[in-house]
């Protein structure tokens, strides 16, 4: 059975939730200050805002014991769909509950029943018409690449197709860094191309918001575009896109098949290790101690998902086990090492925040929360930035442009939030081929 399953099809999973509240906390908290796993719960301060609470509401909708209300929709909409509850739940219950898939199904039920927030509907209209959630003109999507000659050519297929994503494509502050990285790749002899103004939405955000039909259509279009390009490797600069490609597309029955899919940090690390790129160590007069923020999408949510038997075996009258244990996802298979390795190449001392890797705390930028409940999104950012004090550094770096942009809005003057691509752009150099 391929997800997304309907909420009705997930009734058994909803029933198995023991209401233990483990979904609210990281599995191995290092302090009470930073024990929370759930930005939604931190905002709502009521069980309905937690992963387990949303499962209760979903079960109530199925049974007819709960009716739609503004309060219910607000609680559901406050969730960033970060998946941290899923990781915490699996520490105790493995695959028997898997709340994230039920949260996806609950969002889809809201859409199907006509109760999706108006702000989500506006985002979807932007995605359908302009290809980006903000409604920026489609024709401006490739302005960053003016003069770089990255058009796809049927006569000379590229080795690597670049997927840029809306966050970078429309953020003029990042254009210089993006151009520099692409120029270095070209100077290294790599045949590159991009989709330009024709780059479509990945469908990841549509899936998060519960618009499954749109997500499926977007995924199909993207796979067709990438396949037609003839590229053997797809490199994305977008953390949400990586999560969609690796974990949402298989849920929707779509795949890039033999085309490799990498985040740009993974690709750059590969090139450095293969002596095709150089990274100059930074100026040591700069701060060397930095904290790294694991984006939800670049981290736990980019762990590959494979189609598998979702049913559970029942042994000895109640012991439930997976029929496909090899498909279990505990968030450990996300993109964690490449960004940290690149920071070390740059000469930084990388400090782990209390909540990191698979249990990283969400910055609040996802799931449609900034558009629907900006105060909840802001609180999540503030809670994340508060960890810097205990890490004894004032510099936070992330490989996700969406995270750095959102966190930067909430950072105080004594805190520096940097995007990894900016730092790499200053240090990347092509390897010069030896003269004959």
Image (cartoon, rainbow, N blue to C red):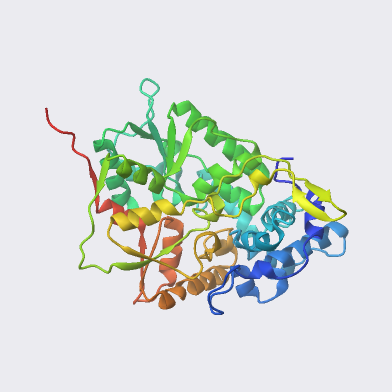
Look at the picture and state if 5 lies above or below 83. above
Where on the picture, by quarter, is residue 56?
Answer: bottom right
Residues 348 and 375: in front is 348
Q: What is the x, y in percent for residue 350?
A: 36, 64
Residues 26 and 298: in front is 26
Q: Quadrant of the C terminus?
A: top left
Left or right position of 295 against 91: left
Left or right position of 393 against 207: left
Q: What is the x, y in percent for residue 128?
A: 57, 44
Look at the picture and state if 168 lies above or below 419. above
Residues 99 and 170: in front is 99
Q: What is the x, y in percent for residue 423?
A: 30, 57
Tell how many labels: 0
- The residue located at (66%, 39%) in the rendering is 307
* Residue 432 seen in the current view: yes
Residues 99 and 381: in front is 99
* Residue 172 seen in the current view: no
**Residue positioned most to the left:** 436
**Residue positioned most to the top:** 155
Q: What is the x, y in percent for residue 167?
A: 44, 52
Q: Quadrant of the N terminus?
A: top right
């Amino acid at each position: 059975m391929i997800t997304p399953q309907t909420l009705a099809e997930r009734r058994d999973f909803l029933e198995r939730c023991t209401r233990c509240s483990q979904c609210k906390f990281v599995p191995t908290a290092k302090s009470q200050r930073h024990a929370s796993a759930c930005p939604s719960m931190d905002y709502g301060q009521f069980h309905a805002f937690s992963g387990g609470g949303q499962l209760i509401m979903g079960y109530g909708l199925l049974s007819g014991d709960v009716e739609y209300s503004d309060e219910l929709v607000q609680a559901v909409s406050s969730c960033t769909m970060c998946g941290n509850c899923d990781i915490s739940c699996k520490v105790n219950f493995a695959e028997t509950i898997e709340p994230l898939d039920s949260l996806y199904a609950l969002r889809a039920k809201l859409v199907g029943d006509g109760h999706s927030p108006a702000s989500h509907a506006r985002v979807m209209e932007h995605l359908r018409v302009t290809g980006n959630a903000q409604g920026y003109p489609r024709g401006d999507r490739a302005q960053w690449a003016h003069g770089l000659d990255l058009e796809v050519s049927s006569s000379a297929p590229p080795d690597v197709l670049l997927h840029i994503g809306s966050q970078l494509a429309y953020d003029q502050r990042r254009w210089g860094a993006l151009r520099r990285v692409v120029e270095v790749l070209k100077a290294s002899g790599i045949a590159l191309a991009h989709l330009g103004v024709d780059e479509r939405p990945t469908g990841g955000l549509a899936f998060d918001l519960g618009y499954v039909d749109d997500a499926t259509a977007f995924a199909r279009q993207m796979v067709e575009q990438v396949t037609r390009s003839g590229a053997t490797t797809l490199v994305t600069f977008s953390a949400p896109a990586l999560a969609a490609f690796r974990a949402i597309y298989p849920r929707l029955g779509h795949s890039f098949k033999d085309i490799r899919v990498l985040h740009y940090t993974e690709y750059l690390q590969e090139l450095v290790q293969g002596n095709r790129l150089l990274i100059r160590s930074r100026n040591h007069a700069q701060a060397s101690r930095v904290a790294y923020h694991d984006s939800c999408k670049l981290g736990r949510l980019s762990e590959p998902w494979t189609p598998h038997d979702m049913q559970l075996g029942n042994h000895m009258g109640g012991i439930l086990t997976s029929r496909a244990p090899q498909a279990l996802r505990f968030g450990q298979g996300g993109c964690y090492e490449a960004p940290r390795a690149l920071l070390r190449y740059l000469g930084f001392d990388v400090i782990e925040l209390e909540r990191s890797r698979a249990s990283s705390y969400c910055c609040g930028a996802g799931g449609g929360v900034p558009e629907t409940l900006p105060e909840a999104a802001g609180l999540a950012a503030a809670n994340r930035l508060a960890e810097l004090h205990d890490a004894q550094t004032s510099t936070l770096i992330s490989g996700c442009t969406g995270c750095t942009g959102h966190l930067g809005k909430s950072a105080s003057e004594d805190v520096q939030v940097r995007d990894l691509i900016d730092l790499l752009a200053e240090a990347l150099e092509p390897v010069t081929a030896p003269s004959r």
